[in-house]
Image: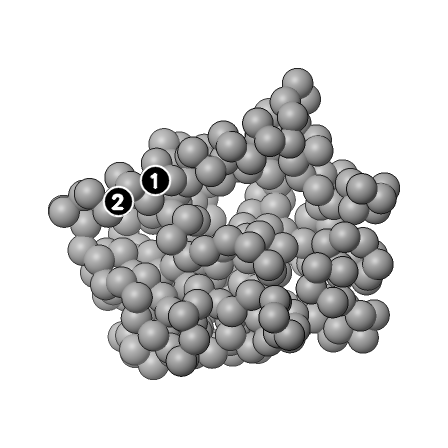
Amino acid sequence: MDEMTRLFSPSCWVPGKSRDEVMNEFFAGIMEAYDSLMSNNTIQKDLDIPYGPDENQKVDVYGDVQDNLLIFFHGGYWVEGDRKYCLTPVPATLDGGFAFASLGYGLATNGRTLSDCVSDAVKGVEFLLQKYPNASNIHIGGHSAGAHLAFQAAVKVHSPSIKGLLLFAGVYFLEELVGTEIGNAINLTIDQAKLNSCDPTLLDGMFLRKSVFVGGLEAPKLIVQNVEFVKGRRGILKQFPLLSHYTLMTQMWNDYSMIKFGLGVE
């Protein structure tokens, strides 16, 4: 692993644990959330709703969509992950009076580009706005690469119904990824990196509640990017010294505070 890849790789930065141990614990946590939600018949579910022809162009909705909706994107550096396995925020979201939509997107594999991922994110959000026209208090969130897609969808859709961003350990500025193992996996060129990087100034004039969350046991480059993303933008950065990139997500299954803070329903 080259040094820049390592600086962007969260599994390398959890003290006392191997990369395999970190990932195995994460997968166990997100699978527990999925299994628990699937077996809970008290939670309303509308699953596998298509917004496009491809298998990943689907959305799962938990709860009854009325006024309040949180749309969420999974992580995985745009080449991994699944909408079924980013559900740890669901209990807190429902408890806060919001429905939760886990929005899938086509990955940047088999000839697809990062721009295609962004296009899917925008199409998916536009689909949900059309499907639920009465939802006037929509927040968009995501973890890791999903935070990048959440930002892109919010600024490109630019709907007055979108009232907030909840960004967990995101990657926003992509030029340093060019030539790394992460960038090579998605055939990231300098042009694609420039085109798809997040420009926080685009949030100026958008009346959004902007909440950014990052753990202290995070990949160093991601810590820097999250701090830089918030700087001067009137967003709120919440740092958790004892959490990693992965426990930031799994913690939400039992601790409702991050989601409720982001939604403004503390």
Query: In the structure shown, which secondary structural element does the residue marked by tag 1 occupy?
Result: helix
73 over 24 or under it: above or below: below
Around disc 2, counting alpha carbons within 10 Å, would you say few (fewer than 14), some (14 to 19), or many (20 or more)? Answer: some
Residue 114's spot in the image, x, y percent? 65, 70
Q: Quick one: quadrant of the N terminus? A: top right
Quadrant in the picture for residue 153? bottom right
The extreme front residue here reads 110
Mark 2 and 1 residues: CB-CB less than 8 Å, in contact?
yes
Q: In which quarter of the image is residue 190?
A: bottom right
Placement of 222 over or under 203, stated as above or below: above
Judge whether residue 113 can be spotted in this image: yes
The quarter holding residue 183 reads bottom right
Measuring 72% from the left and 54% from the top, which residue is drawn there?
A: 182
Q: Which residue lies furthest to the top in this view?
A: 16
**Could you say where residue 130 lies in the image, as x and y percent from the top left?**
34, 81
What residue is disc 1 on?
33
Name which residue type carries label 1. Answer: Ala
Q: Which residue is pictured at 85% across the width and 41% down the height?
A: 3
Quarter of the figure with the C terminus = top left
Task: Look at 69% across and 48% down and name the residue there.
Answer: 226
- Left or right: where does residue 189 sit relative to residue 94? right
| Residue 253 percent location from the top left of the image | 38, 36
Amino acid on which disc 2 is placed:
Leu
- In the picture, measured across the screen, residue 48 lies left or right of residue 178, that is left
Nearer-the-camera pick, 195 or 179: 179
From the viewer's perspective, is 158 left or right of 58?
Answer: right
Residue that badge 2 annotates: 37
